[in-house]
Image (tube, rainbow, N blue to C red):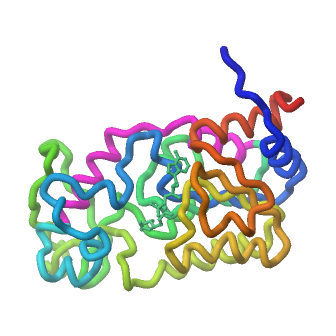
Amino acid sequence: MDSIPVDQPLREAAALLGQARRVVVFTGAGMSAESGVPTFRDALTGLWQRYDAQALATPEAFRADPALVWGWYEWRRHAVRRARPNPGHLAVAAIQTRVPGTVLITQNVDDLHERAGSPDPVHLHGSLFAPRCSGCARPAPSPDDAAGEPADGRRVPPPGCARCAAPVRPGVVWFGEALPPEALETAVEAASSCDLLLTVGTSGLVYPAAEIPQVAARLGAAVIQVNPEQTPLDGIAEVNLRGAAAVVLPALVDAVWVGAAG
Ligand code: APR
């Protein structure tokens, strides 16, 4: 098997991770890129091509056209069901095994961390798999998957709540909505008390989630960033690992625990 060259930034990151006792892993859409999960903006194909993602992911859009918005989330849920965790997700689960107590905070609404073996990720932006009533907030089951989804998507009227009959909505955080208070509190608490935060595949542009690595850095934690592109988080990162999560994270885990560094 070809070995990945261990360069200086990877060596530095491995040294930081090897010494860390309280670790936070903070992930965004880039984490699932190699699994083929369309990012939020890439998900606007077919039926939704002419819409703006930021306008579709709002309570106003759902009220105005529930079938359009629910159909978009059903299409995305089906795409995630077909996807598999990539080696980056597995590497995150390996870090959690090696450093007990590691807190995983994700902005992703997919379930690929769970399927890679990460117990209880903190879902800051909710989940595609936790629909709830738009009226009384009662959790609702995900619809039956038997039908499948046409490639171009379709309008799907949302089911009605079993208790109050209001339309069921996706269990995600839309633009203009508050983050789930418990998830946010857990994330801020973990970021405030960690000694290392590993940020992976996030643009660092969407607030308040983007505060999480900043809180950690402000309170003295080392920040390692994994991203093929520059981001606003470059400045606070002690080490920037430029590359794809599915390649860099397994190399990092190997460098710390399999002794590939050197
Ligand atoms: N590995 C690591 N990072 C990658 C990869 C990859 N293979 N491919 C792309 N990236 C990086 C991009 O360079 C970019 O910086 O992932 C980042 C994705 O940025 P966004 O699409 O803005 O995703 P994210 O930061 O998760 O956005 C936060 O905003 O889109 C809304 O609610 C949605 O939860 C999402 C939130």
Q: Quadrant of residue 204?
A: bottom right
Name the residue: 33% across, 43% down: 81
Which residue occupies the foreground of this view, 146 or 2?
2
Residue at 72% in and 68% down: 235
Give the left or right position of residue 227, taking residue 13 as reference: left
Which is more toward the observer, 25 or 228? 228
Residue at the (48%, 78%) spot, across then down: 180
Identify the image quadrant of residue 11: top right
Front-most of residues 28 and 242: 242
Residue 52: percent from the left, percent from the top? 25, 70
The N terminus appears in which quarter of the rendering? top right
Residue lying at the far top in this picture: please name it.
1
185 sits left or right of 102 in the view: left
In this picture, is 142 found above or below 33? below
Q: Is residue 140 above or below residue 33?
A: below
> Is 53 placed above or below 49 here?
below
The front one of 106 and 234 is 234
Does the magenta-highlighted stretch encompass residue 88?
A: yes
Q: Is 111 placed left or right of 11 in the picture?
A: left
Residue 224 on image: x %, y %: 74, 56
Give the main secondary structure of the magenta stretch: helix
Picture quadrant where residue 143 is located:
bottom left
**Is residue 124 rendered magenta in the image?**
no
> Which quadrant holds the C terminus?
top right
Specify the segment rendered in magenta: 70-97
Residue 259 screen position, x and y as percent:
85, 29
- Name the residue rendered at 79%, 37% in the picture: 7
Query: Where's residue 40, x and y in %?
Result: 36, 60
